[in-house]
Every structure is written in structure tokens, then in C-alpha cells.
Image (spheres, grey):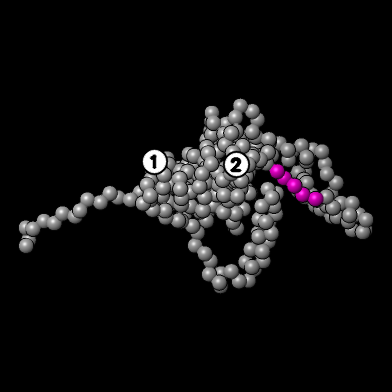
Amino acid sequence: MGGMNFKLPFRKDRKTVSVVRLNGLIASGRGLNDAGLAPVLEKAFGKKPDAVALVINSPGGSPVQSSLIGARIRRLADEKDIPVIAFVEDVAASGGYWLAAAADEIYVDPSSVVGSIGVISSGFGFHELIGRYGVERRVYTAGTSKSQMDPFQPEKPEDVERLKGILDDIHDTFKTHIKSRRGDKLADRDVFTGEIWVGQKGVDDGLADGIGHLVPMMKARFGDKVRLKVFGPKKRGLLSRLGMTVLDDAVHGIEERAAFARFGM
């Protein structure tokens, strides 16, 4: 008995693809952010899959969080030599497209919105309104630029110029990222104006590599037996959602819906 050997019948190992859903507004604290996604991405790449698929549905948000998440995806992909493929659902715009560009390939639905490679800052001016009601604004600062762009004070040309310079710097970083990731695939025209593309037009201008959906494309590439393992952040329990977090979630939800609404979603 001790010297008897048994041979298991030959079985070809199934291919495995880790699927990471990136859904919602990109923001620190709520929504998609590097701190929340770090353990998810580590697990997705750590299982030694044949590929990592990013399923993206995001209108964008924080440029810093977009950069941090994108850099983490690239670092893990390069360290472990794993291809990354992005699949865009409704929208991958602004920071959402930043995340898509972290992938080696990008595929969209015929109605997906991609692009919006730009930077925006918006607000309101209330100085005339409070003046009409006899409200006096009192601000004391140490530092001449500390109260710049105060919505309750008249807009100052030097503050606007300074803000535009900051937006240009962030935009340059965004453009450098897209150029480094998409390279010669991009159309020979300015695609960094902040405009958006839908479906095949995004493919034609090099923002995506083709029309395609997650399951059929992964089956075509890795076989019908491919196993898709979905990774995502843990859902918070009921108790952790009570108190002030309810208000925070409500505010974040309004902001997120407003961001999606910009693209007709």
C-alpha cells in the first residue's frame, strides 16, 4: 500500500480574471479613493490572475485621488506583470477616464461616454446679495492670499489668474498621464479640450481600443471556462451608517448624482 502511486487525470487549469468595479464619484472620504481601494486592488492582483479587469462607471472627481488610484493600479500591474483591461459602462469621464487610462486596453459600450480631459473649478458670488440685505462681511487674515476667491467678496482679477494657473498645472499633469498611457493611439488633434465622446467615436479618436463587454471578451480571450472573481470594498454595517454618516452619505449622493447629470446619466 505504501508504495502505490496514484495519478490524477490531466486537467487544464482554468484561467482566472480578477474583476474590480470602480463605480461612483472619486473623492477622499466618500466614494472612490485610494485608501478604500488599496486593499481591494492588493487582493485582486495578489491572487495571481491571468488579467485584471476594471469595470468603470465614474464621472470623475478629485484629481489627486484619481492619480493615486491610477498609480497604484500601474504599480501592481508592473510589479506582478499582469495585464489590465478596462471596460467602461455608462461613463468614464474626467477622473473616471484617468482610471481607465491606467489600463493597458480600454473597451466601451456603443453608448458609453468617455473623455472630458480637463479641469474645472466652479462656485457662486454672493457679495451683491448680502449687500442688498445689509449684511456686512468681516474677514481677517494673516497672508494676502488667504481669502482668495471668497464667494462673499467681489472677484479679484489676480485671484482668478492665480486659480487659472493652478487649473492649468493640474491639466498638464492629466494630459501627461493620458499621453504616456495612450501614446500614438490618440488622434492627431487636440483631445484635451474637455470634450466628451460616445462609443465608436471615442474608439476612432484613440480614447478606447474597441467596442466590447466584460464577459464575452474575457471568454473569447481566456476560454469559455474562464473564472471571473469580483473584488470590491466591504459594505458597511447598519450601525456604522447611523448618525452623522447618514447626512454625509446623503450629501455625497447629491454631489454624485449632479456629477453624473453633467453627462446625461
Q: How far across and down, in percent of the image, does residue 199 sit? A: 60, 41
Tell me the quarter of the picture where residue 100 sits: top right
Q: How far across and down, in percent of the image, does residue 5 sit? A: 11, 56
220 horizontally vs 111: left or right: left
Q: For residue 59, which numbered disc appears in the image? A: none
**Label 2 SS:** loop
Q: For residue 81, which numbered disc appears in the image? A: 1
Of the numbered discs 2 and 1, the one sitting upstream in the chain is 1
Tell me the quarter of the picture where residue 30 sits: bottom right
Distance Cα–Cα, label 2 vs label 1:
29 Å
Q: Is residue 106 visible?
A: yes
Is 155 part of what is drawn in magenta?
no
Q: For residue 199, which numbered disc appears in the image? A: 2
Judge by depth and name the residue closer to the eye, 34 or 100: 100
Q: Residue at x 84, y 52 (%)?
A: 126
Report the span colored magenta. 120-124
Q: Residue at x 56, y 72 (%)?
A: 239
Amino acid carrying mark 2 in the image: Gly
